[in-house]
Image (cartoon, rainbow, N blue to C red):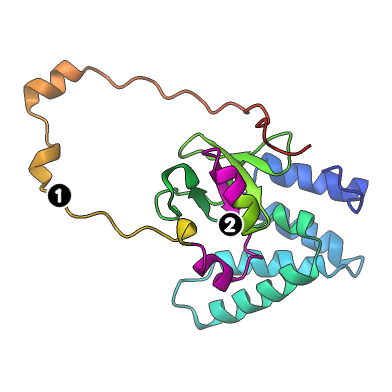
Amino acid sequence: MSHPTFTDDDRAFLRAILDVPEDRNTWLIYADWLDDRGDPRAEFLRLAVARSLMAADDPARLEAEARLTQLRAELDPQWVMMFDPAPVGNCARGSWVRARCAQRWDDMAATDVPDIRICYTCREAVIYCHTIEEARQYASCGQRVALSTRIPAEAIAGAPAFQEPAPPADHDSDEFELTSDEFLDAGPPAPTPRPSVPARPWWKFW
């Protein structure tokens, strides 16, 4: 938020967006404001919202993704980071986890540090990484990371640690069934605590 290219108006819109990241209406209001000023970032926001509403088999989806890729390369990476639908990797397990985490970077809870967010699903801190090398550094500390969508697919393909894992082997469902006595002995589940904002990792460069 303190990036020098962000105006006070930019910061106000970004704060509103980060307060409720899943509300895409605010993205469109911001896009209207940018449009009034002839700012090319407006196209990025509108296209990002449109793509999020497209079905997986929509022919227009590939065209939208190609244009978004082009715009990401042209716009300020610090600004693009705020809206990036980057998937999350659990590098502590040495694998790239996409399906296991229901949320992406652009839907996660913001913190006071722009490149650190909280995943509602796993309740872990996630650091946004602009390069594979940066992600590897945090992986060595067991940190969960989000890989920027600006990173070319071929670069990710060349990094085995960040590949999506193979689906788990099927297991006999009886192995996971509880008897009625076991279910009663287990008692009610413990309440799930709300996620808290983590302290900035000590290995993060200031």
SS label for mark 2: loop
Mark 2 crowd level (few <14, some 14–19, many ≥20, 10 Å Cα): many
Question: Is the residue 192 above or below the residue 150 in the image?
Answer: above
- Disc ID at residue 86: 2
Quarter of the picture holding the N terminus: top right
Number of disc labels: 2
Using the rendered image of the protein, determine whether residue 105 is visible from the camera's viewpoint. Answer: no
Magenta stretch bounds: 136-159
Q: Position of residue 70 (x, y in %)?
A: 71, 76
- Disc 2 residue type (three-letter): Ala
For the point 92% across and 65% down, which residue is it?
37
SS label for mark 1: loop
- Disc 1 residue type (three-letter): His
Q: Position of residue 134 (x, y in %)?
A: 65, 51
Q: Is residue 7 left or right of residue 146?
A: right
Q: Is residue 179 left or right of residue 60?
A: left
How far is disc 1 from disc 2 in space, using C-alphas?
31 Å
Using the rendered image of the protein, determine whether residue 187 is visible from the camera's viewpoint. Answer: yes
- Disc ID at residue 171: 1
Q: Position of residue 119 (x, y in %)?
A: 53, 40
For the point 46% across and 38% down, which residue is it?
122
Q: Is residue 129 left or right of residue 71?
A: left
Mark 1 crowd level (few <14, some 14–19, many ≥20, 10 Å Cα): few
